[in-house]
Amino acid sequence: MSERLRKILTLVFVREPGKILLGLKKRGFGCGLWNGFGGKVEKNETILQGAKRELVEECGIQADVLERIGLINFEFENDPVIMEVHVFLTFHYIGDPVETEEMKPEWYKDGEIPFNQMWPDDKYWFPYMLQKRKFEAYFLFKGMDTILDYWIKESLND
Ligand SMILES: Nc1nc(SCCc2ccccc2)c2[nH]cnc2n1
């Protein structure tokens, strides 16, 4: 896997006790789905800096403390590039979420997460993230809707 082409991306979830902030993607990759906030990591920034930047750009929230909670590799059939998504979590942030051109933010109760309007893999790894259990996962997609294969495991390392 190491010699494959990789695209490094971030995904940030903002939490309150019993609630999670999701954004409805208004354009681009994953348009029409609820997701965390994130995107590409630029050349001149670290993954953590990229995560913080995307959170501000996409919903106006500043998170000084982001905890790395997961690492997910997404592969799409017939696409040579693997998406390496670094997932972050924060309970400590500044500002109220605002709608942007990219995202429409909404708070959801943990038991009312709209998985049927989210990427199909989310229901597999959200439980780890909601319980603050670090995880690694891999999903092989056919198109945008079908998971051909996957694994997920709890990881203890940083
Ligand atoms: N939850 C979730 N997210 C993504 S992409 C997240 C990274 C990203 C990529 C492009 C723009 C913004 C954010 C997924 N891809 C396949 N399953 C998936 N599940």
Image (spheres, helix red, strand yellow):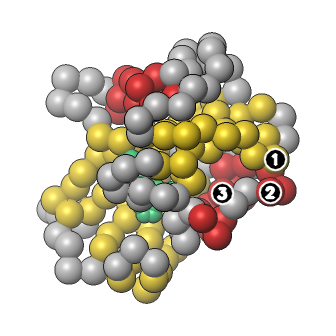
- Look at the picture and state if 107 lies above or below 44: below
- Look at the picture and state if 127 lies above or below 133: below
Bin the neighbour count of mark 1 within 10 Å (Cα to Cα): few under 14, some 14-19, many 20 and up.
some
C-alpha gap between disc 3 and disc 1: 13 Å
Percent position of residue 96, x then y? 65, 20
> Which label belongs to residue 91?
none
- Residue type pointed to by label 1: Lys
Q: Is residue 91 left or right of residue 7?
A: right
C-alpha gap between disc 2 and disc 3: 12 Å
Upstream in the sequence, badge 3 or badge 1?
1
Residue contact between numbered discs 3 and 1, judged by CB atoms under 8 Å: no
Q: Which residue is mark 2?
A: 112
Percent position of residue 106, x then y? 67, 40
Residue contact between numbered discs 2 and 1, judged by CB atoms under 8 Å: yes
Percent position of residue 63, x then y? 56, 20
Taking the spot 64% from the left edge, 34% from the top edge, the residue there is 14
Residue 7 visible in the picture: yes
Q: Which residue is mark 1?
A: 109
- Residue type pointed to by label 3: Phe
Q: Nearer the viewer, mark 2 or mark 3?
A: 2
